[in-house]
Amino acid sequence: MNGAQREVFAAVDIGASSGRVILGRLTEDGPELRTVHRFPNGAQFLGGALRWDIESLFEEVLTGLAAAAGTAAAAGDTVTSIGIDTWAVDYGLVDDAGRLRHLPFSYRDARTESTIGVVHAAVPPEKLYARTGLQFLPFNTVYQLAAERSLDGVQALLIPDLLAYRLTGVRRTESTNASTTGLLDAGTGTWAADLFAPLGLSPDLFPPLVEPGSVIGRLSPAAAEATGLTERTAVVAVGSHDTASAVAAVPAESPHFAYISSGTWSLVGVELEAPILTAESRAANFTNERGVDGTIRYLRNTGGLWLLQECLREWSIEGPEPDLLNLLAGAGHLPPGGPTVDADSTEFLAPGGMPSRIRRAAGAAGGPVPSSREAVVRCILDSLANAYARTLRDAERLSGTRIDVIHVVGGGSQNALLCQLTADRTGLPVLAGPVEATALGNVLVQARAAGLLADGAGLAGIRTAARAAARTIRYEPAHLVTGEQQPLLPAYRP
């Protein structure tokens, strides 16, 4: 890395509950990240459905990029490029004039309930998996598209591609996010053209594919004026599925690692060179999604901190505002062997009434019903740790890989109780951090595209830089493995 460079990179990182614009630059001591703008996000009931207010999101992106331009200029730096990552599967339909047909639906909307059978009647699920390698989830893009009344005269742009189009006027589909549609060939990384016609889809429904590191386009005059950046500023494709960027920044030294990208969802798996498309893999509901540099993220979507977030939201409505640190401390003092639920169950997909749903599910499972808030929190975290352990055992068995260490990245890496429980359930050490793995991976892909990484071979250069930036905490599987019962004191930083 060349510390004399004054180039900086803007990472637009938007999750299902919040977004941020982060400036990153490379120094002799490693990458530095600085958040210049934060904003809330969330699906809203609009027009009788759960949708994303994409217009407000785009305004927040412009505001964040303007803050990035001002911050960079004040430091004598130049914003070289912009990378955008968001959640997967959702999209906007854009006509030839660039107009949205309607606000994008949220994957949590129930509209696909009646379309799954329609899709499977046209293309049997075993054929879908053999071609796309995609885990069955009821909100996969292919099921959402089947719920549209008409797709005539429009193109589908996945959310990060839609934002990039708004900035540049160029339509492209980034490959890591394309792999979550259920329409990308897992083996070739190209569109599975033979699936489109049986599903009644135009082969031109999506724009052309690009790989992470490709320049999508330059800022339009309007975007340059709104942000204060120059029209020379490039928008670079990164791992636009946020998990792809997060996994790229896992600070692993050995190939024998597993990852848990822990946030609203938990993405739990291993990194492979080729997909696994067997019937056994399909039965285990594992997905083969593309990563940076053509790698395969062999993983399963499991329940995530959405369950805890929804409980906190519900309790804040009841008042007073719950103290998360105290709740986690209380949960950490509870003995092991308490109630658990199936954290992957679709019954937890929709918002609303989460504490009651967790209590009902625990009772239906035949265990004790968590009565206190601390017990509900412990039930959630025990259930997540169980799901992680089960998934990683399956990943080892199905892929034939060996896992020596688990890297937890994202917001959940701050939850000491969850990390310790994960180590205990798996019997493997857990390395927690970095928290901002997604933004770090986003920035490092941009930096590599600009030629600023010393080692550009595969992901080695990115991970070397990620290790320089990471501040990890190690959790050993000693707590329950040794039979010792000690309080698990969390160090959670919201």
Image (tube, grey):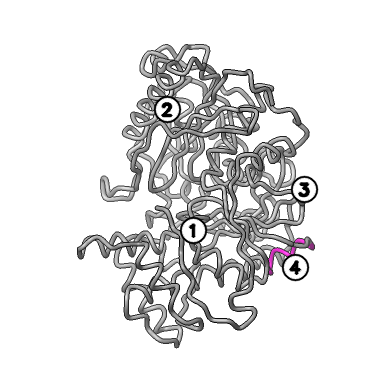
Which residue in the protein does label 1 denote? 138
Dominant secondary-structure state across the stretch colored magenta: helix
CA distance for labels 3 and 1: 27 Å
CA distance for labels 4 and 1: 25 Å
Q: Earlier in the sequence, mark 3 or mark 1?
A: 1
* Residue segment shown in magenta: 393-400
Q: Residue at x 48, y 41 (%)?
A: 86
The relative height of residue 8 versus residue 341 in the rendered view (above or below) is above
- Residue 464: give x, y in percent of width and height: 71, 39
Label 3: few (<14), some (14–19) or many (≥20) C-alpha neighbours in 10 Å: few
- Does the segment drawn in magenta span residue 196? no
CA distance for labels 2 and 4: 46 Å
**Tag in front: 3 or 1:** 3
Instruction: State whether residue 485 appears in this view.
Output: yes
Which residue in the protein does label 4 denote? 397
- Residue 396: give x, y in percent of width and height: 73, 65
Local SS, label 2: strand
Q: Earlier in the sequence, mark 4 or mark 1?
A: 1
**Tag in front: 2 or 4:** 4
CA distance for labels 1 and 2: 26 Å
Which residue in the protein does label 3 denote? 273
Local SS, label 4: helix
- Residue 439: give x, y in percent of width and height: 53, 38
Q: Earlier in the sequence, mark 3 or mark 2?
A: 2
- Residue 120: give x, y in percent of width and height: 56, 58
**Tag in front: 3 or 2:** 3
Instruction: State whether residue 198 appears in this view.
Output: no
Q: Quadrant of residue 61?
A: top left
Asked if the residue under mark 2 is in contact with the one under mark 1, i.e. CB atoms within 8 Å, the reply is no
Which residue in the protein does label 2 denote? 95
Local SS, label 3: loop
